[in-house]
Amino acid sequence: MLPNKMRISENATNLLRRLQNNTGLTVNIGARLAFFISIERNYRFKPEDSSTEHTGRELDKNSWLGEHAQITEQLLLSRYPNYPKQKLHSAWASHVENGIQEVDSKKTLNQLTGLLNDRSGVSR
């Protein structure tokens, strides 16, 4: 359902690279984390409000989504049931952009784990 090649914004690319430098998480793993954080925060993509250009990193769908491809596509379809493939790609990229904003301030894996634990209600 999502295209085989997907691109994110230049801003998201830069933030994901910074996350990789700080924590060692690869760009694609960081993008998956950002996407799910955005979903959890109940972010909604609105194409009419979006002016983000997808001029950043391009990878194939399997690299971006990995073993989470099916759940990612199902979440997008449940939120945006009438969107065509290209608009679903824009929604996915927008969720990555939204979620990476929250992750960006984390400088270590411990801080990142703390963020995830705080969101899930798990005590440290």
Image: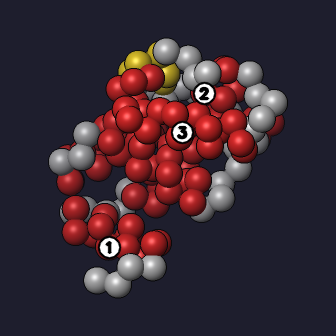
Residue 27 falls in image quadrant: top left
**Three-letter amino acid code at disc 3?**
Thr
Identify the residue shown where x is 39% and y is 24%.
Answer: 62
- In front: label 3 or label 2: 3
Mark 2, secondary structure of its residue: helix
Q: In the picture shown, does residue 45 fall above or below 85? A: below
Q: Which mark is residue 114?
A: 1
Residue 88 falls in image quadrant: top right
Residue 86 falls in image quadrant: top right
**Three-letter amino acid code at disc 1?**
Gly
Are discs 3 and 2 less than 8 Å apart at CB? Answer: no
* Crowd rating for badge 2 (residues with CA inside 10 Å; few <14, some 14–19, many 20+): many
Q: CA distance from mark 2 to mark 1?
A: 30 Å
- In front: label 1 or label 3: 3
Q: Can residue 105 be seen in this snapshot?
A: yes
Q: In the picture shown, does residue 90 fall above or below 85? A: below
> How many numbered badges does the structure rendering display?
3
Give coordinates of residue 65: x percent, y percent: 42, 33
Mark 3, secondary structure of its residue: helix
Residue named by callout 3 = 72
Q: Can residue 50 be seen in this snapshot?
A: no
Residue named by callout 2 = 89
Give coordinates of residue 14: x percent, y percent: 36, 39
**Three-letter amino acid code at disc 2?**
His
Give coordinates of residue 91: x percent, y percent: 64, 36
